[in-house]
């Protein structure tokens, strides 16, 4: 059975869009996730083509590929969507002794909230500070680090 010229055009469009999707995924670049969108379009076009020619086995395969494309789209685009919806970012926490001051900035819904905790190091055990930080998914860094200056890597000790 020969496809009509319309179905032939759908077949070629589906094939070219599918190849574009494969190329985008193979680049492993920031554009790679758009390969899943191209695969989705290719699947829809090839479903139309296989249904038009009543190629039921290939139709079922394309429906399965469509499901994997939807999964790929969900997995590739969900992180930025969740971040845009107000996901909490990990904020650096600066510790200094003998008293410790902690300030956390949390960005939710476009607003900045501040939380602070101050105490004397001699009054609180270090494991309590570590627990407080880990419960809030925070990172502790020495207060004296200057992040604006590049740091030269230290050479490995000889004999290693």
Image (cartoon, rainbow, N blue to C red):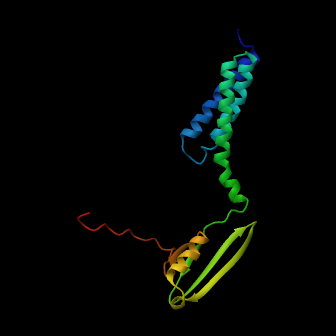
Q: Is residue 67 above or below residue 146?
A: above
Q: Is residue 86 left or right of residue 23?
A: right
How many labels, in total? Answer: 0
At 72% from the left edge and 27% from the top edge, which residue is drawn? 45
Left or right of 159 in this view: 125 = right
Image: 44 above or below 122: above
Is residue 9 at all visible to an observer of this figure? no
Q: Residue at x 69, y 25 (%)?
A: 46
Residue 94 quadrant? bottom right
Q: Is residue 15 visible?
A: yes
The foreground one among 57 and 5 is: 57
Q: Residue at x 43, y 71 (%)?
A: 151
**Residue found farthest to the left:** 159
Quadrant of the rendered structure where residue 1 is?
top right
Residue 38 position in % (x across, y down): 67, 36
The location of residue 86, given as percent across then percent down, is 72, 63
Q: Position of residue 29 (x, y in %)?
A: 56, 46
In the rendered image, which quarter is residue 6 located in? top right
In the image, is residue 108 above or below residue 30? below
Image location of residue 154, percent across then percent down: 35, 69
């Amino acid at each position: 059975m020969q496809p009509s010229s319309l179905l032939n055009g759908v077949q070629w469009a589906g094939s070219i869009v599918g190849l574009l999707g494969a190329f985008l995924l193979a680049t492993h670049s920031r554009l790679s996730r758009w390969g899943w969108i191209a695969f989705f379009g290719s699947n829809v076009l090839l479903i139309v083509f296989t249904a038009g020619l009543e190629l039921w086995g290939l139709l079922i395969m394309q429906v399965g590929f469509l499901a994997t494309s939807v999964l790929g789209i969900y997995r590739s685009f969900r992180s930025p969507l969740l971040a845009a919806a107000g996901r909490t970012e990990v904020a650096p926490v600066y510790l200094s002794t003998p008293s410790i001051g902690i300030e956390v900035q949390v960005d939710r819904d476009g607003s900045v909230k501040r939380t602070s905790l101050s105490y004397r190091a001699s009054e609180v055990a270090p494991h309590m500070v570590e627990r407080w930080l880990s419960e809030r998914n925070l990172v502790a860094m020495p207060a004296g680090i200057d992040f604006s200056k590049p740091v030269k890597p230290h050479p490995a000790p000889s004999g290693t």
